[in-house]
Amino acid sequence: MCLTLGLHLVREGYVTPERLIAALDWQEQRRPRIGQLALRARKMTVRQVLDVLARQSEHREPFGQCALRLGYLTQMDLDLLLIEQQRQTPRVGDILLMQGAVDADTLDAQIARMVRAGVADDQLAL
């Protein structure tokens, strides 16, 4: 949904494509990694995380899928870690607001517009 908001703001002329790309890069740098979250939640050991990191590049698969395949995580563990990752990842609207690329009134109005159009819910960038 955040990409949808970002693209909407670019299309409507509120944000430049370059500002959106910078916000997405900033977001990606601050997204907690599944391995870090698994360690904090005590779902995996350091040795298991290192094993997944070593093997995931061999199989070209995401960390979580590799941990599932190796039996280090259950599907429920991974689902909960992905929810936590999403919860802890800064949202694009918040990033653009923090960076001064868009003001709060404009952001709120555009989110409301997207909600009315049915392309987003009201939790998009709060």
Image (cartoon, rainbow, N blue to C red):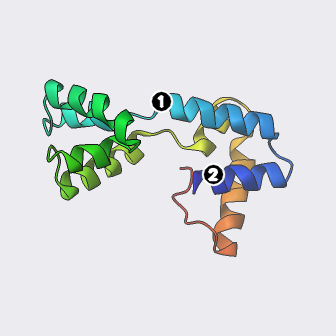
* Quarter containing the N terminus: bottom right
- In percent of width and height, residue 117 lies at 70, 74
The location of residue 112, given as percent across then percent down, is: 67, 63
**Within the image, what quadrant is residue 97 found in?**
top right
Q: Secondary structure at mark 2?
A: helix
Work out whether residue 8 or residue 78 is closer to the camera in this orientation and state it: 78
Q: Position of residue 77 (x, y in %)?
A: 19, 51
Residue at horizontal 59 percent and vertical 51 percent from the top: 2
Q: Residue at x 38, y 45 (%)?
A: 61
Mark 1 surroundings: few (<14), some (14-19) or many (≥20) residues within 10 A? few
- Snapshot quadrant of residue 109: bottom right
Of the numbered discs 2 and 1, the one sitting upstream in the chain is 2
Q: Which mark is residue 30?
A: 1
Viewer-closest of 35 and 109: 35
SS assignment at label 1: helix
Q: Is residue 33 visible?
A: no
Q: Residue at x 33, y 40 (%)?
A: 63
Q: Please rate how many residues cluster around mark 2, counting C-alpha atoms within 10 Å: few if below 14, some from 14 to 19, many from 20.
A: few
* Whether label 2 touches label 1, CB < 8 Å: no
Q: Which residue is mark 2?
A: 3
Distance Cα–Cα, label 2 vs label 1: 16 Å
Using the image as rendered, state which of residue 109 and residue 71 is in the foreground. 71
